[in-house]
């Protein structure tokens, strides 16, 4: 009898434990859903330090280069809410209709299912709470660190110009290249980890002028369909394929450039293929490696100048005065051309040049010998051609 009572008691205990475990599982599942496993998105926004009360705020996306408004709501009591279902994560923007500072630029974020927190001030926005947005924030913080290191090195270099030696220049160049190498490796790592979603594509697109063509080819070869949701990714792929058509033995595609001597636009073809070897140097006054290598560029020009080798520098500065000032300051007494659109210049886009300084060596007949190489490669090739 005692045994039977004990068995019944055990059954009651086990039954109670089962119910408790079931309840705990329900609670756990509910909490998990609230932590990001939702099949819908909820954007809970807060406005701080800005007079946007009562203003409409838009949830917008991109179609090509055009902003398309997908939804809107009213800011009330300094808050706003968007809800919905997102089949696949996409790049979106939050755009208040009024109350923001004139310099406010909508910052991209990832719209994905889950609870998203957004804080907007009159000059900026911060979004967090879901996996891809948190990953995006980590990436942005790391980019700030790299940019700060480069800016500090640039400032130190600029302040040291009056007492600059060749050894110091080389040291600055090595430090700068080391930062750039670490940055590009970090970017490739983040893109590789997100090669199956739109965040990876966004980061590649944002850094298309930092990564080498080989790095871009590598990440694109392993990318999944979701990676290509942004229109610009396909254009990178196409540009890399076009670049394959620019190689030794071919004529370099023509581009229009501004000549510093007469202030007029000219075709590049007017300066090359006229019976002399030509070194084309693509640079910018804001690029530390470009400025540091001017000394070596002068040495190469002097070395081969008497043998009919001509030098052309093409700047991708964006401010004309800075370009002209740098020419005078660095005593660049040769042909100076420019396409003053930065990384959006025809030179960088047409030739898919992603880092500067860049050097191209042209035959006397106008065909390419070395394309988008280093100054050392050009020097070695010229030495071979002129001494054999």
Image (cartoon, helix red, strand yellow):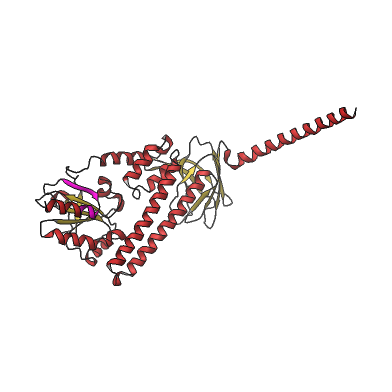
**Magenta segment: does it hold 295?**
no
Relative to 247, does residue 285 appear above or below in the rendering?
below
| 284 relative to 233 in the view: left or right | left
Of all residues, the one furthest to the front in this rendering is 388
Q: Nearer the viewer, residue 90 or 123?
A: 90
- Quarter of the image with the N terminus is top right
Of all residues, the one furthest to the right in this rendering is 1
Of all residues, the one furthest to the bottom in this rendering is 163
| 18 relative to 294 in the view: left or right | right
Relative to 155, does residue 53 appear above or below in the rendering?
above
Q: Quadrant of residue 312?
A: bottom left
Q: Give coordinates of residue 16: x percent, y percent.
A: 78, 34
Q: Nearer the viewer, residue 288 or 119?
A: 288
Q: Give coordinates of residue 364: x percent, y percent.
A: 11, 49
**Residue at point 17%, 60% (across, down):** 301
Report how many numbered discs are placed on residues in the image.
0
Q: Give coordinates of residue 89: x percent, y percent.
A: 48, 39
The range drawn in magenta is 365-378
Is residue 334 in view from this perspective? no
Q: Quadrant of residue 157?
A: bottom left
**Residue at point 49%, 51% (across, down):** 138
Q: Give coordinates of residue 369: x percent, y percent.
A: 18, 47
Q: Quadrant of residue 335?
A: bottom left
């Amino acid at each position: 009898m005692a045994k039977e009572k004990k068995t019944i008691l055990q059954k009651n205990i086990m039954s109670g434990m089962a119910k408790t475990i079931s309840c705990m599982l329900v609670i756990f599942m509910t909490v998990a859903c609230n932590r990001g496993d939702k099949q819908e998105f909820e954007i809970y926004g807060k406005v701080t330090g800005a007079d946007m009360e009562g203003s409409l705020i838009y949830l917008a996306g991109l179609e090509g280069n055009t902003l398309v408004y997908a939804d809107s709501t009213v800011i009330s009591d300094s808050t706003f809410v968007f809800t919905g279902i997102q089949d696949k994560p996409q790049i979106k923007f939050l755009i208040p209709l009024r109350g923001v500072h004139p310099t406010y630029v909508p910052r991209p974020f990832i719209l994905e299912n889950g609870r998203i927190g957004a804080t907007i001030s009159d000059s900026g926005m911060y979004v967090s709470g879901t996996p891809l947005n948190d990953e995006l924030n980590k990436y942005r913080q790391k980019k700030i660190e790299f940019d700060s290191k480069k800016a500090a090195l640039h400032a130190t270099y600029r302040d040291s110009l009056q007492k600059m030696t060749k050894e110091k220049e080389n040291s600055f160049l090595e430090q700068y290249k080391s930062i750039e190498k670490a940055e590009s490796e970090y970017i490739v790592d983040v893109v590789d980890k997100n090669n199956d979603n739109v965040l990876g594509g966004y980061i590649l697109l944002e850094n298309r002028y930092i990564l080498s063509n080989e790095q871009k080819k590598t990440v694109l070869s392993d990318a999944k369909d979701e990676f290509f949701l942004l229109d610009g990714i396909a254009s990178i792929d196409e540009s890399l394929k076009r670049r394959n058509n620019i190689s030794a033995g071919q004529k370099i595609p023509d581009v229009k450039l501004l000549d510093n001597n007469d202030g007029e636009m000219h075709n590049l073809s007017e300066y090359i293929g006229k019976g002399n070897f030509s070194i084309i140097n693509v640079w910018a006054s804001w690029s530390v490696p470009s400025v540091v290598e001017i000394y070596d560029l002068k040495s190469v020009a002097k070395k081969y100048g008497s043998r009919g080798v001509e030098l052309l520098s093409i700047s991708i500065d964006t401010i004309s005065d800075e370009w002209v000032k740098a020419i005078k300051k660095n005593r660049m007494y040769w042909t100076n051309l420019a396409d003053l659109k930065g990384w959006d210049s025809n030179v960088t886009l047409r030739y898919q040049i992603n880092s500067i300084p860049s050097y191209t060596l042209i035959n006397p007949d106008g065909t390419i010998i070395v394309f988008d190489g280093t100054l050392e490669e050009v020097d070695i090739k010229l030495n071979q051609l002129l001494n054999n």
